[in-house]
Image (cartoon, rainbow, N blue to C red):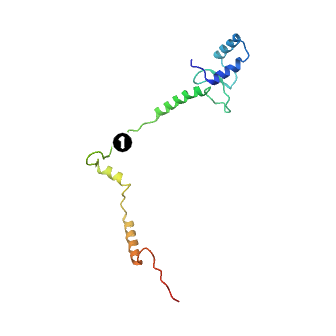
Amino acid sequence: MREPGEGAVEYVKEQIAGLSQEHARKVIRELLSSQPDDPQVKKCAYCGYLFRDKTRPKNTKVCGPSCKTPVKTSQRRVQRAKVEIRPKKPPQYYYWHDYPFWISEKAMLSRTGSYERAFDSDKLQRISSDRDRKNRLGGSKKVIRKVEY
Protein backbone atom coordinates (compact mmCIF):
# COMPACT_ATOMS: atom_id res chain seq x y z
CA MET A 1 0.00 0.00 0.00
CA ARG A 2 1.00 3.60 -0.51
CA GLU A 3 1.67 6.14 2.20
CA PRO A 4 -1.56 7.59 3.65
CA GLY A 5 -2.53 11.09 2.59
CA GLU A 6 -3.32 14.05 4.84
CA GLY A 7 -7.04 13.31 5.06
CA ALA A 8 -6.44 9.67 6.02
CA VAL A 9 -3.99 10.64 8.77
CA GLU A 10 -6.42 13.24 10.10
CA TYR A 11 -9.28 10.71 10.14
CA VAL A 12 -7.24 8.14 12.08
CA LYS A 13 -6.13 10.81 14.56
CA GLU A 14 -9.81 11.63 15.18
CA GLN A 15 -10.59 7.98 15.83
CA ILE A 16 -7.70 7.25 18.20
CA ALA A 17 -7.63 10.54 20.12
CA GLY A 18 -7.18 9.83 23.83
CA LEU A 19 -6.75 6.04 23.46
CA SER A 20 -3.85 3.96 24.71
CA GLN A 21 -1.42 2.44 22.19
CA GLU A 22 -2.86 -1.04 22.59
CA HIS A 23 -6.42 0.11 22.07
CA ALA A 24 -5.36 2.47 19.22
CA ARG A 25 -3.74 -0.43 17.31
CA LYS A 26 -6.95 -2.44 17.56
CA VAL A 27 -8.99 0.51 16.27
CA ILE A 28 -6.59 1.07 13.34
CA ARG A 29 -6.70 -2.64 12.37
CA GLU A 30 -10.49 -2.49 12.53
CA LEU A 31 -10.56 0.64 10.33
CA LEU A 32 -8.29 -0.99 7.73
CA SER A 33 -10.37 -4.16 7.53
CA SER A 34 -13.93 -2.79 7.41
CA GLN A 35 -15.83 0.13 5.88
CA PRO A 36 -17.77 2.27 8.42
CA ASP A 37 -21.49 2.97 7.93
CA ASP A 38 -20.91 6.74 7.84
CA PRO A 39 -21.48 7.97 4.22
CA GLN A 40 -18.92 10.75 4.73
CA VAL A 41 -16.16 8.21 5.35
CA LYS A 42 -14.71 7.04 2.03
CA LYS A 43 -11.76 5.11 0.71
CA CYS A 44 -9.13 7.20 -1.09
CA ALA A 45 -8.82 6.44 -4.80
CA TYR A 46 -5.03 6.76 -4.66
CA CYS A 47 -3.68 5.56 -1.31
CA GLY A 48 -6.61 3.29 -0.35
CA TYR A 49 -6.96 4.52 3.25
CA LEU A 50 -10.18 5.77 4.82
CA PHE A 51 -10.81 9.51 5.15
CA ARG A 52 -13.69 11.80 6.11
CA ASP A 53 -15.09 13.79 3.19
CA LYS A 54 -15.66 17.31 4.49
CA THR A 55 -16.60 18.95 1.20
CA ARG A 56 -20.10 20.32 0.76
CA PRO A 57 -21.17 18.19 -2.26
CA LYS A 58 -19.56 15.08 -0.67
CA ASN A 59 -18.02 13.96 -3.95
CA THR A 60 -14.28 13.93 -3.16
CA LYS A 61 -12.43 10.85 -4.37
CA VAL A 62 -9.03 11.45 -2.73
CA CYS A 63 -8.05 12.26 0.83
CA GLY A 64 -5.73 15.21 0.24
CA PRO A 65 -3.43 17.18 -2.08
CA SER A 66 -0.65 14.59 -1.89
CA CYS A 67 -3.03 12.00 -3.37
CA LYS A 68 -4.80 14.39 -5.73
CA THR A 69 -1.66 15.34 -7.68
CA PRO A 70 -0.78 11.81 -8.93
CA VAL A 71 -4.43 11.05 -9.73
CA LYS A 72 -4.76 14.23 -11.81
CA THR A 73 -1.42 13.55 -13.50
CA SER A 74 -2.55 10.10 -14.60
CA GLN A 75 -5.88 11.52 -15.82
CA ARG A 76 -4.02 14.09 -17.95
CA ARG A 77 -1.79 11.37 -19.36
CA VAL A 78 -4.86 9.37 -20.42
CA GLN A 79 -6.49 12.46 -21.97
CA ARG A 80 -3.35 13.33 -23.91
CA ALA A 81 -3.11 9.78 -25.20
CA LYS A 82 -6.66 10.10 -26.58
CA VAL A 83 -5.87 13.31 -28.48
CA GLU A 84 -5.11 12.58 -32.10
CA ILE A 85 -1.87 14.16 -33.23
CA ARG A 86 -2.14 15.35 -36.80
CA PRO A 87 0.91 14.82 -38.96
CA LYS A 88 2.68 17.91 -40.22
CA LYS A 89 1.83 19.00 -43.73
CA PRO A 90 4.66 18.65 -46.20
CA PRO A 91 6.15 21.99 -47.25
CA GLN A 92 4.57 23.62 -50.30
CA TYR A 93 7.13 26.37 -50.76
CA TYR A 94 10.86 25.69 -50.62
CA TYR A 95 12.30 29.04 -49.55
CA TRP A 96 15.63 27.70 -48.29
CA HIS A 97 17.02 26.87 -51.72
CA ASP A 98 19.08 29.22 -53.89
CA TYR A 99 16.03 29.74 -56.08
CA PRO A 100 12.83 29.41 -54.01
CA PHE A 101 9.92 27.66 -55.72
CA TRP A 102 6.41 26.34 -55.18
CA ILE A 103 5.66 22.61 -55.44
CA SER A 104 2.65 23.21 -57.66
CA GLU A 105 0.66 26.04 -59.14
CA LYS A 106 -2.37 24.98 -57.08
CA ALA A 107 -0.38 25.36 -53.85
CA MET A 108 0.82 28.78 -54.95
CA LEU A 109 -2.67 30.01 -55.84
CA SER A 110 -4.21 28.67 -52.64
CA ARG A 111 -1.62 30.53 -50.57
CA THR A 112 -1.37 33.78 -52.49
CA GLY A 113 -5.10 34.00 -53.21
CA SER A 114 -5.73 35.31 -49.72
CA TYR A 115 -3.22 38.12 -50.24
CA GLU A 116 -3.79 39.06 -53.87
CA ARG A 117 -7.41 38.70 -54.86
CA ALA A 118 -8.44 39.71 -58.33
CA PHE A 119 -11.24 42.27 -58.61
CA ASP A 120 -14.54 41.16 -60.06
CA SER A 121 -15.75 42.98 -63.18
CA ASP A 122 -18.44 44.98 -61.33
CA LYS A 123 -15.89 46.39 -58.95
CA LEU A 124 -13.60 47.40 -61.82
CA GLN A 125 -16.49 49.29 -63.45
CA ARG A 126 -17.30 51.00 -60.15
CA ILE A 127 -13.68 52.04 -59.67
CA SER A 128 -13.42 53.48 -63.16
CA SER A 129 -16.77 55.35 -62.84
CA ASP A 130 -15.68 56.81 -59.48
CA ARG A 131 -12.42 57.94 -61.04
CA ASP A 132 -14.28 59.58 -63.97
CA ARG A 133 -16.70 61.37 -61.63
CA LYS A 134 -13.78 62.60 -59.53
CA ASN A 135 -12.06 63.98 -62.64
CA ARG A 136 -15.29 65.68 -63.82
CA LEU A 137 -15.77 67.40 -60.47
CA GLY A 138 -12.22 68.68 -60.53
CA GLY A 139 -10.56 66.53 -57.90
CA SER A 140 -11.56 64.99 -54.63
CA LYS A 141 -12.90 68.22 -53.10
CA LYS A 142 -16.14 69.68 -54.33
CA VAL A 143 -15.89 73.18 -55.70
CA ILE A 144 -17.91 75.67 -53.70
CA ARG A 145 -19.59 78.14 -56.02
CA LYS A 146 -20.62 81.49 -54.73
CA VAL A 147 -24.09 82.48 -55.75
CA GLU A 148 -24.91 86.18 -55.72
CA TYR A 149 -28.48 87.16 -54.93
Q: Is residue 36 visible?
A: no
- Local SS, label 1: loop
Question: Is residue 103 positioned above or below 79 on the image?
Answer: below
What residue is drawn where x is 39% and y is 69%?
127
What residue is drawn where x is 51% and y is 32%?
76
Instruction: Give coordinates of residue 83: x percent, y percent.
Output: 46, 35
Front residue of this view, candidates 55 and 98:
98
Front residue of this view, candidates 103 and 84:
103
Asked whether, in this view, residue 94 is left or right of residue 145, the answer is left
Q: Which residue is mark 1?
A: 89
**Rendering quarter of residue 6:** top right
Single out the residue that lies furthest toward the left. 98
Single out the residue that lies furthest toward the right. 18
Instruction: Give coordinates of residue 149: x percent, y percent.
Output: 53, 89
Amino acid type indicated by mark 1: Lys
Asked whether, in this view, residue 43 is left or right of residue 101, the answer is right
